[in-house]
Image (cartoon, rainbow, N blue to C red):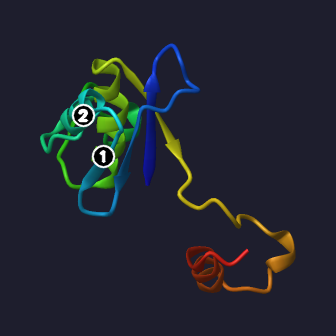
Amino acid sequence: MKVEFHPVDDPESVVGTATWDGRQASVESGDDEVAAKLWNVFRPIPVVVDDAAYRRLGTHGEVSIPPGSLEWFRAAAQVRAAEAGLAARVVSAVTEGGYDPAAGYRSFEETIERLAAGDP
């Protein structure tokens, strides 16, 4: 998963990115100050969110999400970016491919292999 960060008042100006490789976050930015903010966003400590999507059925209130998962990465990007004065948006890592109704004859695994290999 890849997340782009931009100033809250300027969504066209991307100041840094972060990617999740399945185990940890990595950040990139041309500005050292922004890079420091992004490393702070993804410091490996739990994130507290008040979002029903992260709660167990029938519960209410805040939820603590421990580091090391995609859910944590997503929550950290959303919650802590706002604290740093930035806005986060998730972007697609795959720039080509997508849904092809005429390719219904391919299995799901074949489609994923084709997209991962970069074949159009």
Residue 27, percent across and down?
Answer: 30, 46
Neighbourhood count class around disc 2 (C-alpha, 10 Å): few under 14, some 14–19, many 20 upward: many
In this rendering, position of residue 102 left or right of residue 90: right
Task: Let me know if residue 62 appears in the view.
Answer: yes
What amino acid is found at the position of numbered circle 2 in the picture?
A: Val
Instruction: Name the residue: 66% across, 79% down.
Output: 111
Occupied quadrant, residue 32: top left
What amino acid is found at the position of numbered circle 1 in the picture?
A: Val
In the image, is residue 101 above or below residue 111?
above
Provide the residue designation for mark 1: 27
**Residue projecting furthest to the right:** 102
In this rendering, position of residue 63 left or right of residue 95: left
Occupied quadrant, residue 17: top left
Mark 1: secondary structure = strand
Instruction: Name the residue: 19% across, 33% down.
Output: 40
Instruction: Name the residue: 37% across, 31% down.
Output: 78
In the image, is residue 47 above or below residue 12?
below
Mark 2: secondary structure = helix
Residue 116, percent across and down?
Answer: 56, 75
Quadrant, the C terminus: bottom right
Task: Let me know if residue 50 appears in the view.
Answer: no
Instruction: Name the residue: 59% across, 84% down.
Output: 109
Provide the residue designation for mark 2: 41
